Amino acid sequence: MERDYPYLIVGLGIAGLSLLRALEERGIACFVADAGDAHAASRVAPGVVNPLAGKRLSPSWRVAEQLPAALAMYRGLDRLFGERVFHEMPIVRIIKDEAQRDYFEKRRAQPMAQSYIGAEYAPGRWPGLFRDPLGSFEATESGYLDVALAVALAQRHLEQAGRFAKARVDASQLDIRPDCVRWNGMSFGKVVFCEGWRAMGNPFFPGIPFKPAKGEMLTLRAKGGELPGFPKAIVNRGKWILPLGEGLYRAGSTYSWDILDETTSEAGAGIVLAALKEFVDAEFELIAQNAGVRPIVKDYRPVLGAQPGQPRICIFNGLGSKGVLAAPWLAAQLVAHLEEGASIREMDIVRFG
Ligand SMILES: Cc1cc2nc3c(=O)[nH]c(=O)nc-3n(C[C@H](O)[C@H](O)[C@H](O)COP(=O)(O)OP(=O)(O)OC[C@H]3O[C@@H](n4cnc5c(N)ncnc54)[C@H](O)[C@@H]3O)c2cc1C
């Protein structure tokens, strides 16, 4: 059967973009439809790639597989777009308390964690800039993806190829036939929903136990301009701050499970600014504030694969709070599953029946 495209990708966040690239790498060209929600996580997230996350500095889930895939894809995007979207830089971790110091000692002795630990600094490394009474260290193989820019450039690239529609795809618009799915006058082999937290309203996937978390982050201007001596690094002490150049910085993020919306709040800004005050000796002016919702599933694992009983309707979701690190590897897993039947183990949607 002749189909217009083997895949319709619904949603162009980091999940949709990673899937697009994984399919293109196999020579499979897809059509993408995206609603362009201004506050989608991928349009507001700072896109930090951090192999040693959280207070315990534990290596992220499957980081040894995810990190090389992420670095390869994001370096490739720089080349593809001819524009810098991936900013490689270390993450300076300022040790927050004695408990974290203990975790650090433990990680330093573990070969896997150790491979992401670079320079270590004694207290007082940044006089007049950061307060670091328990010292600090650099996490390596890290940086941030300008996700909003990457997604915007991918959209332009698709528009030029005539493979993009700005549209919200509703389940009721899909005509599922034995040999294809029809939407908007075109036919597809499969439809993959990459909708982020909005998948909670998708009637094809009612059984997924989502537990999304709202986050807010800030764009700040340092009073008096660029902070002298600020390293070319993301600096993290629970909350983080990253330099954008010309005296501008991004900082974040908050976590909240109670109110699920994409609006900013004074309380959110207050939490981030108060956390910065604890370790940065500088005054900031608030320039902008963003909010978005992280698509988290209750078991903190991604959710991939075809809807049970309906192999043409698939999902790529549950990227959680580390979607930028995870998405390229997950996309490759999903493509191997859809194209060759490879196992996707604990990520498979079938775990929800
Ligand atoms: C404040 C904040 C900070 C974060 N910081 C980081 C970080 O530093 N590092 C990191 O790795 N991760 C971070 N995350 C998490 C990360 O942003 C997410 O894991 C990731 O962006 C999710 O991507 P996604 O493509 O699944 O969903 P989304 O980014 O939500 O994208 C979904 C896309 O699909 C479109 N869409 C939805 N439904 C439809 C439909 N029916 N039809 C058509 N289009 C549709 C939307 O408009 C959107 O463009 C952060 C998230 C937040 C909110």
Image (cartoon, rainbow, N blue to C red):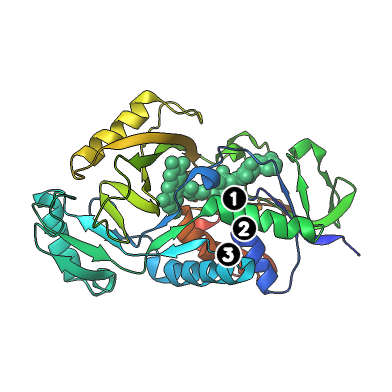
Location of residue 342 (image quadrant): bottom right
The part of the image, by quadrant, that contains residue 298 is top left
Q: Is residue 235 above or below residue 296?
A: below
Q: Quadrant of residue 59?
A: bottom left
Q: Is residue 195 visible?
A: no
Between residue 165 and residue 288, name the one nearer to us: 288
On the image, the x and y values in percent for residue 22 come to 63, 67
Q: Which mark is residue 17?
A: 2
Of labels 2 and 3, the one closer to you? 3
Extreme residue in the front direction: 224
From the image, tell me which residue sits under label 3: 83
- SS label for mark 2: helix
165 left or right of 94 in image: right
Task: Point out the tag, 1 or 3, that comes first from the N-terminus.
Answer: 1
- Three-letter amino acid code at disc 1? Gly
Can residue 338 be seen?
A: yes
Q: Local crowd at mark 3 within 10 Å, few (<14), some, or many (≥20)?
A: few
Q: CA distance from mark 2 to mark 3?
A: 16 Å
Kind of residue sitting beneath label 3: Glu
Residue ID at (16%, 67%): 120
> Going 64% across and 57% down the picture, which residue do you hit?
153
Foreground: 152 or 32? 152
Q: Amino acid at mark 2?
A: Leu
Does the beta carbon at disc 3 come under 8 Å from ligand 1?
no
- CA gap between label 1 and label 3 equals 18 Å
Q: Which mark is residue 49?
A: none
